[in-house]
């Protein structure tokens, strides 16, 4: 069955509940790598991995050498194919449905592309990309995807090979699981491998850990103000589906959210997810990633929340959930920073401004799971110290999970931590966990290993249990240390008793060994005929 993933205008026919049963039956198993698709078994068995690799290689050989450009071009073409398929499906379901690809737009239907070659193909694809932001029936988010879009595959045979390759992709369900989203996750993995333009994705197992700790629920509004490829949105969506799938179905590898009520579904699809990013390319990638994970109505915008605001509604906009990994470094020009955001802080550091943004934009009782550089935890500037005091007094800082410094290798070795906090009541005690391993080597290769603290973190989290790597620190002690959240200041020092043998026993053992040495030395001298 064709998936319904592309948003249409309000007057368009809706597939209804069938969409949920047909499209949400997906199995999300353990990730195969820090940035692999969340369901490796179905994706890899579908054969799509090899075909995605082949498409990327064709583009590289055809002169599209920047992985960001390659993914952008594949995104546009994939969107055009899927939009055509949806248009055809809706026209079969509803005889009153007005087709998108009719009149002057008919020549842009995907089926027409696959029959063209040379300049004719190039001109039609280019015209489609550059005019799709005017397409009737396309949502505002869809129009944003094609804002300033242009064709960058100039080699005609390469373009034809790419169009044919996308046309031949088997995007149907495999083993009862829809693999479109996994395919795109794998495609984004190629972007992560390149580290293009300083952009690198948060490892998916770290995102999964943060989502589990925050535990988003239906009916809550979530934002990622540095959304990147929308990894936190997708993980939060799958988390909610898992929490509302029948246990028997979960055992069979099905995650369909079948226990969600219709009103919860509607809220989840239309109001739950918001994202911002100041990189136009990342916004477009995020939009298609969300489309392919059934979140076509998520609100994604291109701007910097530290400098732009909400067109008049700032600072009143709040969210129930904030999940993000904002930029670690960089400074904003003083005149660009929102005055409300920088009030009393007097800083240009993006990591501090983002933390203030989180505090300001959490609704009462709202919860956040964010990654920050270690400098935020123990920086001695007035801004850093004052911000930590604000965090600990305006919010309940529930956890500080210190991540190994190699989590973001090979792109960065900076030390980072995860902060979990809730708005509305002061902190009484902070649970610290010092993660030493995340299931992957901490060198540039990041190969899978046995050692992994994540299961232990999740097991200890509900009761804030203490152990070799975890401990609780009362707020009074943190206040005494100038609001520092440096783990080294609070980690308990354990003295292990060492038992030594008695001196007489040690001396007797030494003499016995020495006697044995003399004895064997004499025997050796006799054998070689030497004299002592």
Image (cartoon, rainbow, N blue to C red):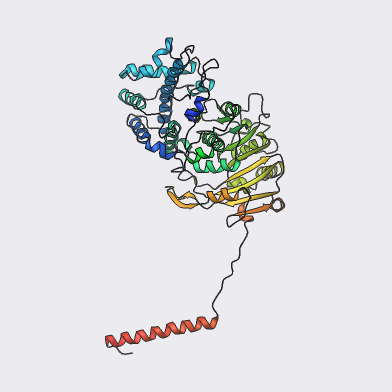
Tell which of 228 and 148 is nearer to you: 228
82 left or right of 219 in image: left
| Residue 398 seen in the figure | yes
Q: Is residue 46 above or below residue 482?
A: above
Number of numbered tags placed on the structure image: 0
**Measured from the top left, where is residue 468 in percent x and y?**
58, 57
- Dividing the image into 4 quarters, which one contains the C terminus? bottom left
Tell which of 406 and 247 is nearer to you: 247
Q: Which residue appears at 65% of the width and 46% of the height? A: 398
- Dividing the image into 4 quarters, which one contains the N terminus? top left
Place residue 245 in its image quadrant.
top right
Q: Is residue 393 above or below residue 495?
A: above
**Measured from the top left, where is residue 210 in percent x and y?**
56, 42
Q: Which residue appears at 56% of the width and 40% of the height? A: 211
383 left or right of 230 in image: right
Q: Which residue appears at 36% of the width and 18% of the height? A: 111
| Residue 381 seen in the figure | no
Tell which of 73 and 412 is nearer to you: 73
**Measured from the top left, where is residue 74 in percent x and y?**
40, 27
**Residue closest to the far front:** 248
Q: Is residue 174 above or below residue 521?
A: above
**Residue closest to the far bottom:** 531
**Measured from the top left, where is residue 497 in percent x and y?**
59, 69
């Amino acid at each position: 069955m064709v998936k319904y993933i592309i948003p249409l205008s309000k007057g368009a026919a809706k597939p209804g509940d069938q969409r949920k049963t047909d499209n949400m039956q997906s199995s999300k198993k353990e990730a195969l790598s820090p940035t692999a698709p969340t369901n490796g078994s179905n994706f890899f068995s579908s054969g799509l991995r090899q075909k995605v690799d082949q498409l990327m290689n064709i583009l590289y050989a055809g002169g599209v050498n920047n992985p960001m450009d390659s993914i952008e071009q594949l995104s546009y073409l994939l969107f055009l194919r899927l939009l055509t398929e949806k248009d055809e499906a809706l026209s079969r379901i509803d005889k009153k449905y007005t087709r998108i690809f009719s009149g002057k737009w008919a020549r842009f239907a995907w089926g027409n592309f696959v029959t063209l070659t040379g300049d004719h193909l190039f001109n039609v694809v280019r015209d489609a990309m550059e005019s799709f932001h005017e397409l009737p029936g396309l949502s505002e988010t869809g129009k944003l995807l094609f804002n300033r879009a242009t064709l960058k595959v100039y080699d005609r045979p390469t373009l034809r090979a790419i169009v044919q390759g996308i046309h031949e992709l088997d995007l149907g369900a495999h083993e009862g699981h829809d693999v479109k989203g996994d395919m795109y996750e794998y495609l984004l993995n190629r972007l992560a491998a390149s580290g293009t333009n300083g952009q690198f994705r948060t490892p998916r197992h770290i995102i999964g850990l943060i989502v589990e700790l925050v535990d988003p629920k239906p009916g809550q509004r979530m934002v990622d103000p540095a959304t990147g490829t929308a990894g936190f949105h997708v993980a939060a969506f799958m988390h909610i589906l898992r929490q509302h799938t029948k246990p028997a179905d979960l055992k069979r590898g099905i995650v369909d959210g079948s226990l969600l009520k219709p009103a919860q579904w509607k809220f989840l699809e239309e109001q739950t997810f918001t994202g911002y990013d100041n990189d136009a390319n990342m916004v477009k990638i995020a939009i298609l990633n969300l489309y392919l994970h059934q979140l076509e109505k998520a609100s994604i915008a291109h701007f910097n929340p530290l400098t732009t605001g909400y067109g008049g509604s700032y600072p009143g906009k709040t969210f129930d959930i904030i999940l993000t990994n904002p930029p670690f470094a960089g400074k904003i020009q003083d005149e660009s920073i929102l005055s409300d955001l920088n009030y009393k802080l007097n800083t240009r550091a993006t990591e501090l401004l983002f933390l203030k943004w989180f505090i300001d934009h959490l609704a009462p009782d709202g919860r956040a799971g964010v990654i920050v550089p270690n400098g935020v935890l123990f920086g001695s500037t007035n801004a850093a110290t004052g911000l930590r005091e604000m965090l600990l007094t305006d919010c309940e800082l529930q956890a500080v999970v210190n991540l190994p410094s190699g989590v973001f290798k090979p792109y960065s070795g900076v030390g980072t931590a995860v902060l979990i906090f809730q708005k509305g009541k002061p902190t009484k005690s902070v649970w610290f966990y010092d993660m030493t391993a995340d299931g992957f080597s901490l060198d540039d290769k990041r190969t899978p290993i046995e050692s992994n603290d994540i299961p232990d973190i999740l097991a200890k989290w509900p009761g804030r249990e203490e152990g070799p790597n975890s401990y609780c620190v009362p707020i009074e002690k943190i206040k005494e240390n100038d609001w520092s959240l440096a783990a080294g200041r609070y980690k308990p020092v354990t003295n292990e008793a060492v038992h030594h043998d008695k001196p007489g026993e040690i001396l007797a053992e030494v003499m016995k060994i020495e006697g044995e040495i003399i004895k064997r030395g004499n025997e050796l001298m006799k054998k070689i005929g030497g004299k002592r």
